Image (cartoon, rainbow, N blue to C red):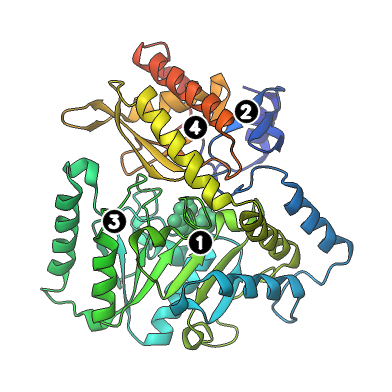
Amino acid sequence: MSDLYQRETKCISNMAQLRFFPQAVIGGKGSYLTGDDGRRLLDFSASWGAASLGHAHPHVRDAVARVLTDQAGASYLSSANEPSVLLAEKLLSIAPGRARGRVWLGHSGSDANETVARMVVAATGRRRILAFQGAYHGGTVGSMAVSGHPALQAGARSSGLILVPYPNSYATGKPAIASAAALASLKEVFSKDVRPEEVAAFFIEPLQGDGGLLVPPPDFLAEIEKFCRQHEILLVCDEVKFGLGRTGLLHAFEHSGIEPDIVVFGKGLGGGLPMSAIVGPQPIMNHSPTFSYQTLHGNPACAAAALAVLETIERDGLVKRSAEVGSYMMESLSSRVGGLSLVGEVRGKGLAIGIELVSDRVNRAPAKLQTALTVYRAFQLGLVLYYVGANSNVLELTPPLTLSKGEADDGIAIISQALQDVIDGKVTKELVSQFAGW
Ligand code: PMP
């Protein structure tokens, strides 16, 4: 364990920690981080997708530097500033038609989803919200209130929240069965004492991320959209993790051919700086002044970083690149590790890839310990990746959108080696005893 990691334990609280191995970094460029031991670490997480253009991208750096040499304040609460306005204009130009009204800017997926959750109830007068079991919409009280992920405190859930299952094609064996079962559960909710007219909004993830990188069956979200339209329920798409090019389309919801009313962006939007956004219809987004604000919201340096991210994605064709490098990785992973006894399924879209690990391929029993050992071993071999899932058994790959095929090859070689070492019993469980992950 490095000196920096040790020092951290003596000064920083563990409450925000989600650790898988003793990583301590002192720098980074592109797809690589620099460890405090001097090692170069290939980053297949990109800080959970937040470093969407990799680390120290020159356009993000230059945009932030320009703002900080002649700084138009630090907030948009009591003054307009140009980077916030430019960012909002840009977001409106890329938003789906139904959402093209107004933009709210925040710091994180959590504050944005919390704002949506409060706003849709206040603006519609309907008190209930629908969301999926396993959904992660944030770590603040108000965003946990509409989440269904087991790592979030269940006690914080809103009394108006209704959780329904997200289809799990791998667990059920067939996408059509998974879809039918999930839709039947939704119907069941409304066959009892709840009326759809009580529901303000349905929060969806276009792929379920922290719940296990689940790709919905082809028609599933279109059915959800149909249900929402029938009952005038607002469809809120949480694009925080997989939006803005990661899945090989600009918006991840486009894979399902749906058009949400409200779209939430975060993580990769800021290219490594804190920035989130809600885009939605004018009457709802203009609910009332002082409804949801924090001092540094609309910070011009963060807004400029986000604008640089959106411009770079467009200018460098990163959506297409994500689709290409992503399908290259899917093919390579399927052929190199897909046949290993520990690998249940390789799935994903673009550069959002999950590898579900099982201890038994017939009954698909989750291989929780082996998953923890695999990411630990990969770290030892020079690759950063973490895991997700209600059963903590899905390796998650969300590398920078700028990843090259050569870097993809290098990372996949490490994943393959790490899995083989775990299968061969070369990685001992004591290594992960201090790393609970989630
Ligand atoms: N929505 C989704 C889909 C997420 O995956 C996350 C974070 N895992 C959030 C919201 C919350 O984002 P943040 O942690 O940046 O607040």
Q: Disc 2 designates what residue?
A: 41
For label 1, count other residues whose C-alpha is less than 10 Å away and answer few (under 14), some (14-19) or many (20+): many
Inspect the image, locate mark 3, and give the three-letter code of the amino acid beneath it: Gln
Q: Earlier in the sequence, mark 3 or mark 2?
A: 2
Q: Earlier in the sequence, mark 2 or mark 4?
A: 4
Inspect the image, locate mark 4, and give the three-letter code of the amino acid beneath it: Phe
Residue 223 in sight here: yes
Q: Disc 4 designates what residue?
A: 20
**Measuring 23% from the left and 80% from the top, which residue is drawn there?**
230
Label 1 CB-ligand 1 distance < 8 A? yes
Q: Disc 1 designates what residue?
A: 110
Rounded to the nearest whole Å, what is the CA distance between mark 1 and mark 2?
Answer: 28 Å
Q: Secondary structure at mark 1?
A: helix
Asked if the residue at tag 2 contacts the one at tag 3, i.e. Cβ–Cβ closer than 8 Å, the answer is no
Q: Earlier in the sequence, mark 3 or mark 4?
A: 4
Q: Secondary structure at mark 4?
A: loop
- Furthest residue in direction right, as rendered: 69
Q: Which mark is residue 48?
A: none
State the image quarter where residue 305 is shown. bottom right
